[in-house]
Image (tube, helix red, strand yellow):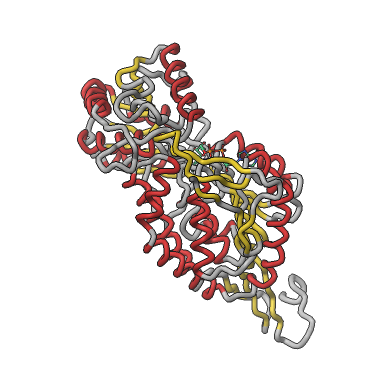
Amino acid sequence: MSKKFQNYVSGTWVDAKSGKVFENRNPAHWDTVLGTFPLSGKEDVDEAVRAARRAFESWRLVPAPKRGDIMRAVGDIMTRRKEELALQMTREMGKVLLETRGDVQEGIDTAYYAASEGRRLFGHTVPSELPNKFNMAVRMPVGVAAIITPWNFPMAIPTWKIFPALVSGNTVVFKPASDTPATATALVEILVEAGVPPGVVNIVHGGGSEVGMALVEHPDIDLISFTGSTSVGKKISEVASKTLKRVSLELGGKNAQIVMDDANLDLALEGVLWGAFGTTGQRCTATSRLIIHEPVYDKFLSMVVDKSKKMRLGDGSDEGVDVGPCVNENQRKTVDSYVQIGRSEGAKVVAGGTIASGNGLSKGWFYEPTVLADVTQEMRVAKEEIFGPVLSVIKVRSLDEAIAVSNNTMYGLSSSIYTQDINNAYRAIRDLKAGITYVNAPTIGAEAHMPFGGVKETGNGHREGGWTVYDFFTEWKTVYVDYSGKLQRAQIDNS
Ligand code: NAD
């Protein structure tokens, strides 16, 4: 019998008020139900927001270093439970154990970074223009944060948002993706075990247009941190603007790896396989385009095709498997339809291109690692986010053309160049329009203490990770302390 999970509101585990539930299944074995979860609605959101608002009044007064201490305990518990969490995540969304371990590790790194930030949260002291007066700007919590997350990094992404929100003194209502509710629940259990008081973190499971939108519309939500698709991000931005909420959007990508003729091709090969087919291509930073310099096009393409065909598909919990399934049936349909679109546009399918069949694969959402050659930059497969194991390969004649092709997309998350020429590398760093540029490394590989985010329609200018995310989760309070004992008028008495 599958396990029954609940929402966590005001310190209590509860069902949805409607009593309705939804199922969560293993994408590698779709007949295996992993659990049932509350199918919540607006009334569940209302209660969670009320709880978070009440808890905010006391949580904001807990000293930040003490809030940080709780994050350290969270990191310790996650470290202890790492293997079990990784296995649960693989069962829930399919990526291979090596990667789900990495996903949990990113959460651990984020927890320890957040713990240390509890002892910083630096403000500014600035000299006053008047005598006997002290000026400073300090960080204050904002209030109640709605955290809405996707399924592809079910632990790392929620931790990127929830930990800095909490250390900064905000309270949280968390709406995870309905494909990965068990990992999200485990994260809340860990926060509770580590000592987060009732009401400070609440989780409400359910659909995006019901639970997610109810949070976005809620008048008592102060800020929204969202990661997901660009189309949903735009909708959220539109609705949230009606109540002038602060909104951070981390959205889609169409990332490219450039390989120049002077590149170390063996290194570039490892990079592109990891970038394109890791997490079954379902990363916002996935290498979705490969831009090859003409002199090495044929050679490098055949290296990529050869290795792609040898990748082992299967249940991600089996050691030795390289590529797991797509997360669900819809995602696989999308992938397959893009391969058909590519074919009809004139791209050549040189590896994969089909739903995977074979031993142990028939009951999972598997798709062959696919390489599309002879892609031109006008094709939809060169422009639109596919979010699956499909690599579009484009030939270019120069570095300038490579950069122009890389930039020719509405997205701007990650970018990569393989070259041994330092001049090429620095020109790419300067000219690639992306939030992240890797040199001699694939388009994936974010570290928790560095800013993360993109330009153009990948986001709205905020950054997650590192010190930058604390700008989103805090409000500046400007403070003037006048100890002159008399009225001093700025701009008037300072001449
Ligand atoms: P999605 O946009 O469908 O859903 C993301 C979350 O939003 C889910 O929790 C979903 O339930 C919720 N949601 C859906 N409709 C909503 C609505 N109308 N109002 C409020 N919430 C709503 O995305 P997904 O399929 O879960 O994830 C894949 C997408 O996420 C890809 O586009 C990928 O590039 C992007 N992504 C971006 C980053 C980044 O940091 N830039 C990281 C990971 C994933």
Q: Quadrant of ligand 1?
A: top right
At 26% from the left edge and 36% from the top edge, which residue is drawn? 268
Q: Is residue 22 left or right of residue 293?
A: right
Residue 265 sits above or below residue 446 on the image: above
Residue 470, image x and y in percent?
Answer: 55, 60
Q: Residue at x 34, y 34 (%)?
A: 277
User: 209 or 242, which is in the foreground?
Assistant: 209
Residue 2 in sight in this render: yes
Q: Position of residue 335 (x, y in %)?
A: 45, 25
Along the line of sight, the residue nearer the viewer: 419 or 116: 116
In the image, farthest residue toward the right: 487
Question: How many labels sit on residues?
Answer: 0
Seen in the picture, residue 398 relative to 155 is either above or below; the reply is: above
- Image point 60% across, 61% down: which residue? 201
Q: Which image quarter is the C terminus in?
A: bottom right
Compared to residue 43, the image places residue 228 above or below, namely above
Q: Nearer the viewer, residue 99 or 325?
A: 325
Spot occupied by residue 347 in the image (x, y as percentages of width and height): 38, 15
Task: Residue at 39%, 53% (x, y): give it.
Answer: 447
Q: Is residue 396 visible?
A: no
